[in-house]
Amino acid sequence: MPIGKLARYALFAALIGITILTYLREQKQPQGRIPEPIATSGRQTDRSPPSVVPVGSGFDYYVLALSWSPSYCAAEGPRANRQQCAPDRRYGFVVHGLWPQYERGYPQDCDTSQPRDVPFAQAKQLSDIMPSTGLVIHEWRKHGSCTGLSQKDYFSVIRRAVERVSVPPPYRQPTSRGPVNPLVLEQAFIAANPGLGTDGVAVTCDSEYLREVRVCLTKELNFRSCPEVERSTCRRRSVEMPATP
């Protein structure tokens, strides 16, 4: 056989072999799966599981402070923030803050490489749970700066914390009700949140109004005890829990 014809046969056979190997390799790949993204050092990719919570550093745990908005509006009167207390703003429990804590005491106003100001568009994204733009900025500067998180991650954790804590149905709407016993409200939160104990929540008040429910959470947003916070529980037997005007 001429050498030229033999070379063409050899090339043809090689191409067939490559085609067969490629086919066999494709058949071994799992069907219907998207390839895993390449792992990056120290960062989560956009394909991170939704259950992953950005974990902060430099503190021991969080306190999620849920403020009863009508109490704030009534106590502050004309000085109250209009974004939160205008006549058409019917808020019940809103976020006062997500505060990093030590086992004793807490950090505040920490140095950070992040900007001190919060872009309006970013603050606006929290308006359904944190209606005051000024409060968002204040909480970032005083508390968020001490979490070791970026602004974006800190505000993401705030929303995740709110989703973690269930407000008992009777207390979700700012409707008229008689005076309430803070202990009854605390027990309602415990009943609505399996895993939350009496030593992991505090209901606060002033001389007239019920003010806040404070829930202690780990950095991963699991319930935990916090005796120092629990000691701030309101000791009154009856306080007002006003409705929106």
Image: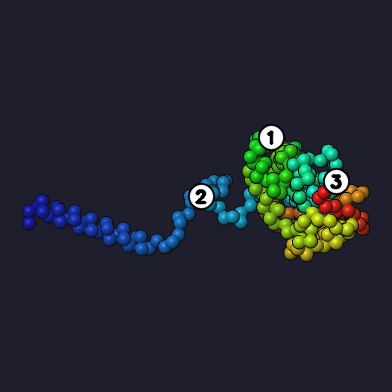
Disc 2 secondary structure class: loop
Please report the residue visible at 82 percent of the width from the left and 45 percent of the height from the top: 73
Nearer to the camera, 198 or 158: 158
**Mark 2 sits on what residue?**
39
Q: Establish if 110 lies above or below 100.
A: above
Disc 1 secondary structure class: loop
Q: Quick check: 161 left or right of 26? A: right
Q: Position of residue 231 (x, y in %)?
A: 86, 53
* 1 or 2: mark nearer the eye: 1
**Lower sequence index among marks 2 and 3:** 2
Q: Position of residue 236 (x, y in %)?
A: 92, 55
Q: Position of residue 52 (x, y in %)?
A: 61, 54
Q: Amino acid at mark 3?
A: Ala
Q: Amino acid at mark 2?
A: Ala
In terms of image quadrants, where is residue 76?
A: top right
**Lower sequence index among marks 1 and 3:** 3
Q: Amino acid at mark 1?
A: Arg
Q: Position of residue 110 (x, y in %)?
A: 73, 37
**Mark 1 sits on what residue?**
116
Disc 3 secondary structure class: helix
Nearer to the camera, 87 or 104: 87
- Tell how many labels: 3
**Mark 3 sits on what residue?**
74
Q: Quick check: 48 left or right of 6? A: right
| Cα–Cα gap, marks 2 and 3 | 51 Å
Please report the residue visible at 78 percent of the width from the left and 64 percent of the height from the top: 191
Q: Establish if 187 lies above or below 40.
A: below
Nearer to the camera, 164 or 61: 164
Please report the residue visible at 45 percent of the width from the left and 56 percent of the height from the top: 34
Q: In the rendered structure, are the residues bearing label 1 and label 2 in contact, judged by CB atoms less than 8 Å apart?
A: no
